[in-house]
Amino acid sequence: MRLTLKVVPGSSRDHVVGRLGDAIKVRVSAPPEKGRANRAVASLLAAFFDLEPAAVRIVAGGAASRKIVELEGADPAAVSARIDSL
């Protein structure tokens, strides 16, 4: 399953905000340098969707604020329900 994200690095805390148009808005405290924010996004999503960290992969937008992530083995209905619960 793939999700489009709008990532805001350098926030006060790591959290999934909710839907923002066709994307999911995510805030991470890590700075956008040397892949730190990307690693924080992957860790946050793994915890949020109850997945193994290796199951979350950024497949597009590694250096941009809009990213596409792949959630390997995720149930689309469960992911949608979890996002809707925000």
Image (cartoon, rainbow, N blue to C red):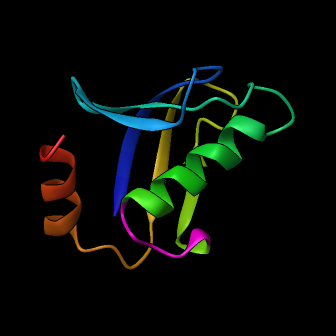
Q: Quadrant of residue 74?
A: bottom left
Q: Quadrant of residue 79?
A: bottom left
**Image quadrant for the C terminus?**
top left
Q: Which residues are magenta?
A: 49-53
- In the depicted view, which residue is nearer to us: 62 or 33? 33
Number of residue marks = 0
Asked whether residue 59 appears in the rendered view, the answer is yes
Looking at the picture, how far across and down is residue 32, in whole percent? 74, 25
Q: Residue furthest front?
A: 12
Decide: is 2 above or below 8. below
- In the depicted view, which residue is nearer to us: 78 or 57? 78
In the displayed structure image, the side of residue 69 where residue 74 appears, left or right: left
Looking at the picture, how far across and down is residue 36, in whole percent? 77, 39
At a point 46% along the width and 54% down the height, the residue shown is: 45
At a point 58% along the width and 53% down the height, the residue shown is: 42
Whether residue 13 appears in magenta in the rendering, the answer is no
Looking at the picture, how far across and down is residue 28, in whole percent? 57, 32
Q: Residue furthest right?
A: 34
In the displayed structure image, the side of residue 15 where residue 60 appears, left or right: right
Looking at the picture, how far across and down is residue 35, in whole percent? 79, 40
In the displayed structure image, the side of residue 83 where residue 1 appears, left or right: right
**Image quadrant for the N terminus?**
bottom left
In the displayed structure image, the side of residue 50 where residue 75 appears, left or right: left
How would you classify the magenta stretch by its main secondary structure? loop
- In the depicted view, which residue is nearer to us: 46 or 61? 46
At a point 53% along the width and 36% down the height, the residue shown is: 14
Asked whether residue 58 appears in the rendered view, the answer is no
Decide: is 70 above or below 36. below
